[in-house]
C-alpha cells in the first residue's frame, strides 16, 4: 500500500502522540487509546461552510487506512460516513505503520542512540559527563530528548565533536572559521551548531557563568569570530623577542594583539593607577579626560583571557618591582552586568580590583539619564544582596532598587 501525503501526515501525528505518552515506556500494554479529535481547531477546512472537498478527501483516505487495519474511525452520532469525530491509532498494527512510513520506532531509535551516547561519553571531556548522564537516562526511560538537541546521528557526531573542541585546552585564540575547517572540513559548520553547543554548555557545564553572553563564553575558551586587539593607553614599557615598545609614544592608544601580550615582558610602568574600562566610548573618554598617569585598558564587556593576562602580568610586575604598587580599578555600568563583570574580573585574576565611579554619589548625579528596570531585572539585581562578593555595591544596589533605574557608564561625566 502506498500512502498518500495526507495519510502519512495523520499517521505521523498519531504515532507522535503515541510515543509522547507518559506510559509509553511501560512494559505492560496500556488500555488508553491514542487518537486525534476531528474538530475545528485541528482540521478547520473539514468544517468549511461552502467547500466540502477536504472533508470528503479526509473521510475517504481515513476509510482506506481503516480498511488496512491501521486506524479505527469514530463518526458523529447519527452522521456515520459523513462527519468524523475521532481517528484512533490501531496499536496492533504499529509495526506495519512504521514500515509504511519508513519510520523507526522510538524504542529502536533509542536503542541505537544508547550505544552512540555511551561511546561518546567514554571519549568526551569530563565536563560533559552530566550531559551524557542525562541523555542516557532519558534514552533508558524512553523519554523525549531536549528539543534543542533532537538530531540525527550525523548531527550528533558533529555536535559532540564541537562540544569536545569547546573544552579543549588552547593557549592561543582560534578563529571560528578556522576551528570549523579543522573539525568538519567546512568553514560554516561550527556556526550551524554553535547555538546547540552553547545550550549544552550553559545547561550542563557552566551554570555558574550563565550571565555571560554567547561571545563571552566562547572567548573564555579562546574561540573568537575575528582577531581582537587589546586597546591600552598610558605610561608602560615592555619588550618582546621582536623589540621594545613604549606605549606612551602612541596616542590616544595602541591595540596589542594577544600573541604580543603572551610574549611581553614588562620593563617599566609609572602608572599611579591601573583602570579597566567596560565600554569603548568611555575608554576614550577616560584617555582624553582622565589623569595622564593612569594606565587604561579597554575590556570590551566581559574580559577574556588576553585582557586578564595583561592585568596579571602588571600585578606580578608591581609585586616584584614596587614597594608601593598602584591600585587596580574597574569602571563599568552601574547595572547587573557591570557588577558581574567587576566580580568576574576579581575572581579570575585574583587581583583586589576596586570599583571606580560606581557608587551612590555618581549614581545620583547621573540618575536623570538612567534607564528604568523591569521587575524581573530588579529581582535579579536584588539577589546580589545575598552574595558576599558584591558587598562593595550593597548600598548602591539598595538605592537602585529604590529609584528603579540603572545607569550606563556613558552617562557619567569625569570629575578629575
Image (spheres, helix red, strand yellow):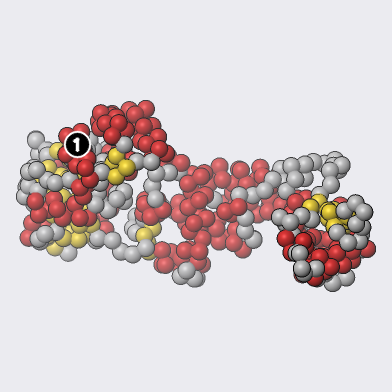
Choose top left, top right, bottom left or bottom right for residue 247.
Answer: bottom left
Give the position of the N terminus as an image quadrant: bottom right
Give the position of the C terminus as an image quadrant: top left
Total marks placed:
1
Residue 166: percent from the left, percent from the top? 45, 54
> For mark 1, does the 10 Å Cα neighbourhood hold few (<14), some (14 to 19), or many (20 or more) residues?
some
The answer to whether residue 65 is above or below residue 264 is below
In front here: 85 or 348? 85
Residue at (71% x, 52% y) in the render: 110
Q: Is residue 61 at least partly visible in the picture? A: no
Label 1: element kind: helix
Residue at the spot of label 1: 364
In front here: 414 or 119? 414
Residue 305: percent from the left, percent from the top? 31, 50
Horizontal relation, residue 72 to residue 168: left or right: right
Residue at (39% x, 44% y) in the render: 211
Choose top left, top right, bottom left or bottom right for residue 159.
Answer: bottom right
Residue at (48% x, 58% y) in the render: 194
Q: Is residue 165 at least partly visible in the picture? A: yes
Residue 348: percent from the left, percent from the top? 31, 41
The answer to whether residue 261 is above or below residue 56 is above
In front here: 128 or 89? 89
Horizontal relation, residue 132 to residue 329: left or right: right
Residue at (26% x, 58% y) in the render: 258
Residue 6: percent from the left, percent from the top? 78, 67
Amino acid at each position: 500500500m502506498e500512502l498518500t501525503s495526507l495519510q502519512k501526515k495523520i499517521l505521523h501525528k498519531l504515532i507522535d502522540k503515541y510515543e509522547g505518552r507518559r506510559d509509553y515506556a511501560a512494559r505492560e500494554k496500556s488500555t488508553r487509546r491514542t487518537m486525534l479529535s476531528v474538530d475545528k481547531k485541528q482540521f478547520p477546512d473539514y468544517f468549511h461552510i461552502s467547500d466540502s472537498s477536504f472533508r470528503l478527501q479526509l473521510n475517504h483516505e481515513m476509510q482506506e487506512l481503516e480498511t488496512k487495519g491501521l486506524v479505527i474511525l469514530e463518526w458523529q452520532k447519527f452522521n456515520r460516513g459523513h462527519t468524523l469525530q475521532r481517528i484512533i491509532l490501531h496499536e496492533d498494527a504499529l509495526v506495519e505503520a512504521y514500515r509504511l512510513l519508513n519510520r523507526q520506532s522510538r524504542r529502536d531509535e533509542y536503542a541505537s542512540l544508547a550505544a552512540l551516547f555511551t561511546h561518546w561519553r567514554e571519549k568526551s571531556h569530563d565536563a560533559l559527563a552530566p550531559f551524557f548522564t542525562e541523555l542516557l537516562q532519558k534514552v533508558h526511560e524512553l523519554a523525549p530528548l531536549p528539543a534543542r538537541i533532537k538530531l540525527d546521528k550525523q548531527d550528533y557526531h558533529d555536535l559532540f565533536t564541537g562540544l569536545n573542541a569547546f573544552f579543549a585546552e588552547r593557549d592561543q585564540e582560534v578563529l571560528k572559521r578556522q576551528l570549523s575547517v579543522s573539525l568538519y572540513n567546512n568553514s560554516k559548520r561550527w556556526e550551524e551548531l554553535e547555538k546547540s553547543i552553547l545550550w549544552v554548555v550553559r545547561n550542563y557545564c557552566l551554570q555558574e557563568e550563565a550571565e555571560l553572553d554567547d561571545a563571552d563564553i566562547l572567548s573564555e575558551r579562546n574561540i573568537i569570530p575575528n582577531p581582537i586587539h587589546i586597546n591600552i593607553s598610558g605610561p608602560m614599557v615592555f619588550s618582546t623577542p621582536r623589540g621594545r615598545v613604549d606605549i606612551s609614544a602612541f596616542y590616544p592608544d595602541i591595540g596589542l594583539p594577544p600573541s604580543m601580550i603572551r610574549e611581553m615582558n614588562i620593563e617599566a610602568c609609572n602608572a599611579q593607577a591601573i583602570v579597566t574600562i567596560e565600554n569603548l566610548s568611555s575608554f576614550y573618554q577616560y584617555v582624553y579626560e582622565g589623569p595622564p598617569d593612569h594606565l587604561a585598558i579597554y575590556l570590551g564587556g566581559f574580559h577574556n583571557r588576553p585582557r586578564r593576562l595583561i592585568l596579571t602580568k602588571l600585578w606580578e610586575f608591581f609585586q616584584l618591582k614596587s614597594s608601593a604598587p598602584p591600585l587596580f580599578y574597574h569602571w563599568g555600568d552601574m547595572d547587573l552586568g557591570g557588577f558581574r563583570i567587576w566580580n568576574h574580573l576579581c575572581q579570575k585574576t585574583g587581583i583586589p580590583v576596586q570599583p571606580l565611579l560606581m557608587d551612590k554619589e555618581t549614581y545620583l548625579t547621573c540618575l536623570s539619564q538612567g534607564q528604568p528596570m523591569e521587575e524581573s531585572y530588579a529581582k535579579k539585581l536584588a539577589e546580589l544582596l545575598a552574595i558576599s562578593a558584591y558587598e562593595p555595591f550593597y548600598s548602591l544596589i539598595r538605592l537602585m532598587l529604590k529609584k528603579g533605574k540603572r545607569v550606563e557608564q556613558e552617562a557619567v561625566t569625569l570629575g578629575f
